[in-house]
Image (cartoon, rainbow, N blue to C red):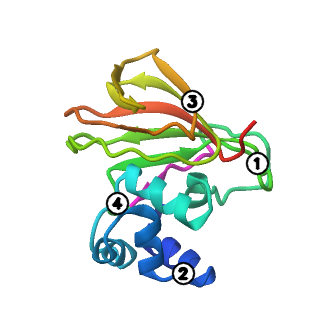
Amino acid sequence: MHNNIGNMIRDLRIDQRLTLKDISEKTGLSISFLSQVERSKSSVTLRSLTRIADALGVSQSYFFKNQTEDSPIKKSDQERELDFQNTNFIYKGLTGQIDDPVFSPMLVVLLPGDHDELLSTSSHDGEEFAYVLSGELTVKIGDRISELREGDSFHIKSSTQHTWYNRTDEIVKLIYVYSNIDF
């Protein structure tokens, strides 16, 4: 299943009567980059998508909603991976069909080669938890940079400046749970 994440971003932005300049100012991303993402002319990283979601006032899971049957049970043989064109990641939603969930669990696969050494961080409302299933995940929380491997995890208030990504040449898989509500 291929979803056009650029169309989803553009439709949500237009529905909220926001301009590319508005989103650029909120995210620190250039207008030309945002325009290219909306037109599927440029790939979007997980870090950039997080900034865009925050600017649009939605959780990251907004872009990864499952279009499956109305059931709280998720069987592995019934679940389809959400594979996005022009991204360096794949999300598989693990949530049931609950309107406005308090948290959103996902399986995240980060493809190799996100070599952004700038480690730009962001902050937003809510909490995040990640458990590394395989590979090596680079995490920056505040000023601290850590490499997490299989079995390692982090749990933070999302208001802390943070980012995480795959800068290796191997795939990284993790369980990611996100809530945009502060508890």
Task: Give the residue at x 35% y 32%.
Answer: 172
Q: Which residue is mark 4?
A: 44
Q: Earlier in the sequence, mark 4 or mark 3?
A: 4
- Give amino acid for label 2: Leu
Circle 3 crowding by C-alpha within 10 Å: few under 14, some 14–19, many from 20: some
Taking the view exactly as shown, the residue that stands out farthest to the top is 151
**Circle 3 sits in a helix, a strand or a loop, which is it?**
strand
Q: Quadrant of residue 27?
A: bottom left
Tell me the mark number nearer the camera, choosing from 1 and 3: 3
As drawn, 12 above or below 143: below
Q: Which residue is mark 2?
A: 18
Q: Which residue is mark 3?
A: 156
- Give amino acid for label 1: Pro
Q: Earlier in the sequence, mark 2 or mark 4?
A: 2
Disc assigned to residue 1 = none
Circle 2 crowding by C-alpha within 10 Å: few under 14, some 14–19, many from 20: some
As drawn, 161 above or below 40: above
Mark pair 1, 2: CA separation: 25 Å
**Circle 4 sits in a helix, a strand or a loop, which is it?**
loop
Q: Nearer the viewer, residue 89 or 145?
A: 145
Tell me the mark number nearer the camera, choosing from 1 and 2: 2
Q: Which residue is mark 1?
A: 101
Mark pair 3, 2: CA separation: 30 Å
Indicate left or right for 117 with 106 as reference. Answer: left
Task: Give the residue at x 55% y 58%.
Answer: 54
Q: Earlier in the sequence, mark 1 or mark 2?
A: 2
Mark pair 1, 3: CA separation: 19 Å
Mark pair 2, 4: CA separation: 19 Å
Q: Nearer the viewer, residue 88 or 126?
A: 126
Can residue 131 be seen by looking at this rendering? Answer: yes
